[in-house]
Image (cartoon, coloured by chain):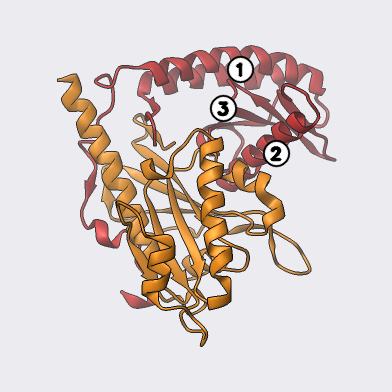
Amino acid sequence: MALINQASKEIQVKIVYYGPALCGKTTNLIKVHENVQITGEKSKLVSLANQSSDRTLFFDFLPIEAMSIKGYRTKFQLYTVPGQVIYNTTRQLVLRGVDGIVFVADSQYDKMSENVDSFTNLEENLKSLKMNLADIPYVLQYNKRDLPNVAPMEYMEFLLNNREVQVPSFEASASKCEGVFETLNMITRLLLHKLLTESQRKVAVAA
Amino acid sequence: MGSLPQLIEEDIKEIDSILSVFIKKAEATSVLLLAEGGFLVCQYGQTDGLDTMSLGALASNSFEANRMIAGLMGEPNFSSIYQAGENCSLFVQSIDGFNVMVVIFPVTVGVGLVRHYAQSARDEVARVFTRAKERAPNNGLDLAMMNVTDSSQIFHRRNNS
């Protein structure tokens, strides 16, 4: 749930990168951290990962502040979850208070069932937190498009975006920083529009 | 996103006053107030050189992990956690089940003292949060100043601009 501090004119929003193990969630955050244009001091990327294998154990965390929003300091907190199936409790924990989601799917053919399982797991975990995916802004990122054995986009759309309301989806090669900023900009755009719409609706109701 | 909890100037002033008193009485070094999701609401005391944003995210999630451990043990809740250090220690206190207060204090101060005053500060801060959540939408929800100049490009890639 976004926090609005009217006194300091500051908004804080939480975005979680979700997806199966080794799909590139952490790589997305690393590339944002390496390449984002910022004013002032660069934030740290905090990674709670296994020291030997570099696999996310708890979460990765990157706070970034938007430059182009006037009037409010808008801070986005980017989190990843551990993708490995056994860490479901941790995923539930990190999803707490989420405002927007980036679902990162692995485009390799043999990862399709893991993508679908992870997406189902996301919906279940949100339900356990009394949240509904349909009410939360989210985007899909089809990562690893640079690999040779990838599934066609149409097939991935059919598997993951075959719903009444389709959400924006992006092809990406996060390791080359391709599609990373397009994905991030879309989820932040959806979030800001939701904030503004909600604000206007409430003001209209009050009037 | 559910309802949007908003803190207006009056809330922040009140929290400021509560935590200023708390820091003195508890002899703490600094205190952070975190909202659900790990958002840093405010910070008091000596925080120079401290990455409070990361500290807040880590403390909040660590506290939530402890809450889950409590659930696995059949405990209704762990309302606080304490980490003893060599120079300074950490005390994290749940405020209302969602928000937490993180207190950093020197090891020369007893945790009992911090816990005692943290509990009364918690009740006072919880009242402010409850009031902010229940506030009527027309009493503060104003994003009129917000100007998304180009929402398609909120973040720019450094070597691509």
Instruction: Give the structural element (helix, strand or loop) at label 3.
Output: loop
> What is the CA distance from the residue labelled 3 to the residue labelled 2?
13 Å
| Helix, strand or loop under label 2 | helix
- Seen in the image, is B119 located left or right of residue A63? right
Q: Which chain letter matches label 1?
A: B
Q: What is the number of the mark on residue B98?
A: 3
- Crowding around mark 1 (Cα neighbors within 10 Å: few <14, some 14 to 19, many 20+) is many
Chain letter, colour red in render? B
Chain A colour? orange
Q: Is residue A87 above or below residue B3?
A: below
Q: Amino acid at mark 2?
A: Ala
- The residue carrying mark 1 is B122
Q: Earlier in the sequence, mark 1 or mark 3?
A: 3
Question: Can residue B48 be seen here?
Answer: no
Residue B104 - label: none
Instruction: Where is residue A146? Give x, y as percent.
Output: 47, 84
Q: Which residue is nearer to you in this view: A131 or B28?
A: A131
| Picture coordinates of residue A185, whole percent (x, y) | 34, 60
Q: Establish whether labels 1 and 3 are both on one chain.
A: yes
Labels 3 and 2 touching (C-beta < 8 A)? no
Q: Amino acid at mark 3?
A: Phe
Circle nearer the N terminus (1, 2) = 2
- For disc 2, the marked residue is B65
Q: Is residue B160 visible?
A: yes
Q: CA distance from mark 1 to mark 2?
A: 20 Å
Residue at (64, 41) in percent of width and height: B61
Label 3 chain ID: B
Quadrant (top left, top right, bottom left, bottom right) of the N terminus of chain B: top left
Please indicate whether residue B66 sits to the left or right of residue B35 in the image: right
Amino acid type of the residue tagged 1 in the rendering = Arg
